[in-house]
Amino acid sequence: MNTKQRTLAILILFVTSLVMSGCGAKQSYTLKCDISTENLGFEITGESGSVQTTYNNESQGYEYDASGQISAITVTVNRDLVYENSKHAYHIEGTITIKQTVLLTYDITATGDAFGNSPQTCTRP
């Protein structure tokens, strides 16, 4: 076997080992929002294992109509998630507006480890 053949064989073995071990595969991470008038759920797809959630001064603001009844609620989301398996940490913040029993809008942004310089968002204008 000459030098070129030997180099080619080594290169093929290296590429094959990368493919077999999964080192060449990139994991996809995405912010997934499950938001309704009854649920405010967030997760990062691609992560696994248990997650520790820290709530950072989240709040609810209320608007009232002329008769004193609640006409709208604005929820301010501000929380940190840390996934046990990967140790990836994420920060999620934004607002959700509900008028009477109808979800009007939300604008949620997540930043963190797997997202790098590309924050993920969920919006409903």
Image (cartoon, helix red, strand yellow):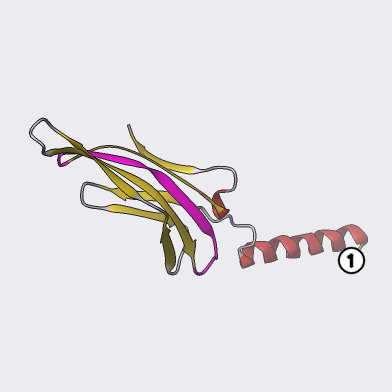
Q: Residues within 10 Å of mark 1 (few under 14, many from 20)?
A: few
Residue 71 versus residue 92: which sits nearer the camera?
A: 71
Decide which of 81, 114 is in the foreground and name it: 81
Q: Please name the residue shown 51% across and 53% down the image.
A: 28
Label 1: element kind: loop
Q: Is residue 101 left or right of residue 14?
A: left
Pick whichever, 69 or 79, lies toward us: 69
Numbered-mark total: 1
Q: Main secondary structure of the magenta part?
A: strand
The residue lying furthest to the left in this view is 67
Q: Residue furthest right?
A: 2
Residue 114 painted magenta = no
Give the magenta-colored segment's residue range.
84-101
Task: Identify the residue at horizontal 31%, vertical 41% (top origin).
Answer: 96
In the rendered image, which quarter contains the C terminus?
top left
The residue located at (28%, 46%) in the rendering is 60
Q: Find residue 5 and report its horizontal and vertical position in percent.
A: 86, 60
Give the percent coordinates (x, y) of residue 43: 40, 56
The x, y position of residue 115, in whole percent, is: 55, 49
Q: Quadrant of the image for the N terminus? A: bottom right
Residue linked to disc 1: 1
At a point 48% along the width and 64% down the height, the residue shown is 83
Q: Amino acid at mark 1?
A: Met
